[in-house]
Amino acid sequence: MSRSIMDIAGSVRALDPAASAAAAAHLDSLTKPPGSLGKLEALAVKLAGITGEMQPKFPGRGVVVMAADHGVCEEGISAFPTEVTPQMVLNFLSGGAAVNVLARQAGAEVMCVDVGVNAELEHPDLISRKVRFGTANMVSGPAMTREEAEAAIMAGVEIVEEAVSRGIRCFVTGEMGIGNTTASAALMSAFTGVSSLETVGRGTGINEERMRHKVLVVERALECNRPDPSDAIDTLAKVGGLEIAGLTGVILGAAANRCPVVLDGFISGAAALAAERLAPESVNYMIASHVSQEQGHVHLLKALGLEPMLHLDMRLGEGTGGVLALHLVDAACRIMTEMATFESAGISSGNDQAGSSGESQI
């Protein structure tokens, strides 16, 4: 019998409390005041809870760049034409995009997935999981069918499972799709009730006039489709995107396999909202890499209860912020494995443990 999305969601378990406690105790034995490494300590504790290992390592890491087009671009909500989506996919595949550069620096593999690009694409390194050639225009009806949203989610799950079988144990969410900040704003408004005035951002760098138009487009899409926020798949199908649904599957697949998943920016955050609605425990496997300049992102992270690691004023997407945060994942792991303890270094420790490290959401 084939698995369902709910089977995957149901297999996401709570973090390992024993591993988290052991990591916190080890951190407090190291040659530093308790808690003095701040978010790095919280990250180390979280990684231990995710993996069930006090001192995890992630030599295999992958960036899953989901690519798809959006019919809502017919409404003139982007500064770039839709032809850019397939062009950028080929740029990823040739290794020339920003995410490729930063992934090489971080030792991460870039997996480029066509889940809904509105073009015929062929390349030996392309992962083709095309569900349909772009979504429909959501201002006049659902972006896709429920079955198509489910297929995109499962594509993400399956890509993670294949990568895990090759030794990848840490994932970064990436995406490409002209128009996807519009779909993400609609999803955030649908899931959280936050007004489109606060969820809609400048995306590719639109001006004030087009920004006001984009707000109205999101409002029209929500009014037309009336997505059910208690049904994440319904919401994804009506006002989401194929790449966003694919990333929802990546997050669920990573959590089900006890792998950390580093979220990039606003679009990845919208996928994370959907994943959290499907499997509430999945949020514990998410690491917020940064807060982007898209105005809705900070509110989205608050809705998830996540604190960003970095503030770099980025708004590129692709997985770029997520890949930069891999260096902090490495730093947290190396602190756990390489730093001396008070005992091993023969250094007197303080008696006040009030500042002891503890788990917090990242």
Image (tube, helix red, strand yellow):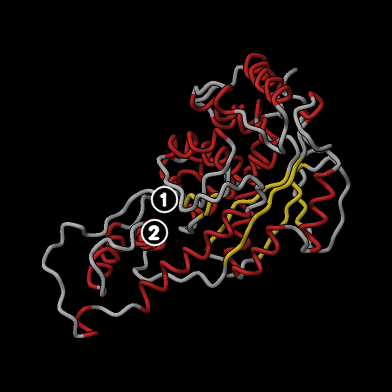
Which amino acid, mark 1?
Ile
How packed mark 1 is, by other alpha carbons closer than 10 Å (few <14, some 14-19, many 20 or more), is many
Q: Which residue is mark 2?
A: 43
Residue type at mark 2 is Leu
Q: Nearer the viewer, residue 269 or 22?
A: 269
Regarding residue 151, the answer to whether it shows in the image is: yes
For this view, does 307 lie left or right of residue 165? left
x 49%, y 37%: residue:
298
Q: Residue at x 72, y 19 (%)?
A: 139
Q: Secondary structure at mark 1?
A: loop
Q: Residue at x 80, y 38 (%)?
A: 80
Q: Earlier in the sequence, mark 1 or mark 2?
A: 2
Q: Is residue 4 visible?
A: no
Discs 1, 2 touching: Cβ within 8 Å: yes
Up-down relation of residue 97 to residue 141 (above or below): below
Determine the CA span between mark 1 and mark 2: 7 Å
**Number of marks present in the image shown:** 2
Residue 362 disc label: 1
In percent of width and height, residue 97 lies at: 75, 58
Using the image, determine if residue 336 lies above or below residue 7.
Answer: below
Q: Position of residue 256 (x, y in %)?
A: 48, 53
Which quadrant of the figure has residue 245? top right
Q: Nearer the viewer, residue 2 or 318?
A: 318
Q: Quadrant of residue 236?
A: top right
